Image (spheres, grey):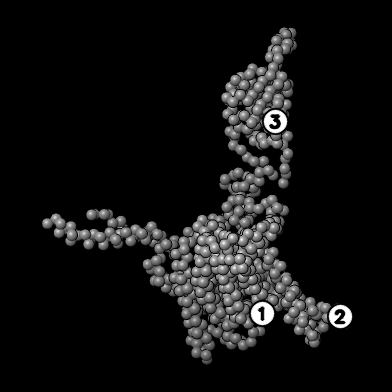
Amino acid sequence: MSAAITPVRKRTLGELIRRLLLLDLFKGLALTFKYNLRAFYEPRDGGNPNQAIYTEQYPLEPARVSERFRGAPRLNLDPDTSGTLCIACDLCALACPVDCIEVGSIRREVRDGEKVNKKKVLTTFTFDTSRCMFCNLCSEACPTDCLELTQSFELAVYHRSGFRWDREMLEKGINYVRYTK
Amino acid sequence: MLSINTILLLVAPEWVLRLTGERQPDVFWAEYIVWPLIQIALVLFIILTLVAYLVYLERKVSAFIQARLGPMRVGPWGLLQPAADGLKLLLKEDIIPLKADRAVFMIAPIISVVAALVVLSVIPWGAAWATIANINIGLLFILAVSSVSVLGLVLAGWSSNSKYSLLGALRSSAQMVSYEVGMGLSIIGALMFAKTLSMSGIIDAQRADGVWYVFFQPIGFLVYLISALGETNRAPFDLPEAESELVAGYHTEYSGFRWALFFMAEYTAMIVTSAVAVTLFLGGWHFPGLDWLRGQTNQAVFVIASVLIFAAKLAVLIYAYMWIRWTWPRYRYDQLMDIGWKWMIPAGLANIVLTGIYYVLAMPKAQGGLFGLMQSQATQMGERLVPTAWGKLYFIATGFAVTIPLVWLLLATINRRSRDFNLHEQRQLQMNLRRERIQKSAEPQAAGSAQ
């Protein structure tokens, strides 16, 4: 049996001094003291990992979400005419894997200068947020950048019927109760 | 015949005496009954509020150290959190386990908290009337009474009839008993200089010598601080409450206000040990410039200033406690015992011997000393040996430059074999030794079988 005898490593002088003066313990103390001190004078910037205080006071101050976060749906309006951008093409409803979108429309004559066109016009738009899985396929299917999933995430309601968002809610958004500090 | 003067005499005898300038005949009631009761009420109120706010402070310090905010919701910056906690604990159901020893279970937290609170009476919170009882064996009293709190923990662990409680109690009793020895030894060096056990006397001695005893006794101070951490069961020696092993240690089965009593005892013990450290090593309520203030203003201002100075020194030590708790990890149990018995006690003993030698050498030549660095002086404590300027330098230099290396050498010699806490390396060493032994014993047999 020729088991290799592993020699116990000799400490270098530097390591010896570290041990003697308990440098590692004091290094730890210095680090925690630095954090404690920074907590007093550093302005808080919630969610910043390099900050002395990482905590976000969520209901009192808006919580941060990632840029790619997909939350509450919204129907965008035309910034010039403030009419809806939706052309009632139904592509979002077709794209939706869970069938949570219902688009209601009528054909109507729309005057565009001299010409009179028969056009599909949006009447109702129902979005069931309880079924939605926030996959963003509807938003990607939308040809006019009308339907969009925003970063708002406070979707809780008191009753199930509240999950069915109608066109008005989708265009205006919900009115949240805002708590202040 | 209850004149205003009599009422005032009951409440504030010193002020009346100072105003009238003559000794009053019936000062007994004021001096021994009414005034102490007022002091007790005041100190209890302040300390118990302080304990509640120490919990708040602990939560805040831990939060800041861990990049959190801590309690923020109850009141501005969570300042009313202690009140909410206290109310919750008061209103909670008082659960006593079915198989617990009821009487002992109920008494245990009371023993713990009383042992912690009684000690508050002899601590010199400030000059003159800020001390409740200035007894001449104050330090002895503190050490004796605070060791009774171990009894509370042991009884709590035993009567709970739970394995976690029992193990926690066993651990805490072993730990507190062994750290008490180191604590007692570390104090003696400073007492040699003070030559009194009275708490106020120790402060007066430091005023007379003109030096805080930390500078004479660096090793003593260090050993005292570490032993105090062990004695109060705080991190890194909080093994009795190691939540990863023992749920909550000796108070696992306690809830509501009985649990709060244990908590109170722990934090009061923290205040007491810090106060003793401040008194013995950091000059108590004394601070350079305070004597000047005494000449300038009336006594009340002076006493309040002295109380504030004491509180500031206390706060520094208590912050250090919390700082250490939220920085360092817990020691293993064998390491804890190692530190108590093989490091703290030898260091304390060596410190006593060395301090004694320095002291004898520095005595006046007429009294058999060698250097004559001390001289007899009339102080407010009476005749006492006070080190001269060179004497102070001598004591400080020996304390730092001779005691520390010598104690270190001693500890290194004692702990030559167990110096390394690293279990991995120790195991490696043992495995190597065993391998060598096996090889040695196997060689002749191998040779025999080959033939």
Q: Nearer the viewer, residue A172 or B29?
A: B29
Please state which of the two labelled residues, at mark 3 or mark 1, is closer to the viewer: 3
Q: Residue at x 69, y 35 (%)?
A: A157
In the image, taking residue B371 as reference, residue A150 lies left or right, namely right
Q: Nearer the viewer, residue A165 or A114?
A: A165
Instruction: Find disc 1 in the rendering and name its residue.
Output: B134
Instruction: Find disc 3 in the rendering and name its residue.
Output: A161
Near mark 1 (Cα within 10 A), the count class, few <14, some 14-19 or many ≥20, is some
- Disc 3 versus disc 2: distance between alpha carbons? 78 Å
Numbered badge on residue B106: none
Instruction: Find disc 2 in the rendering and name its residue.
Output: B2
Q: Nearer the viewer, residue B326 or B334?
A: B334
Quadrant for the N terminus of chain B in the image:
bottom right
Dot 2 falls on which chain?
B
Q: Residue at x 63, y 82 (%)?
A: B136
- Is residue B280 visible in the rendered image? The answer is no
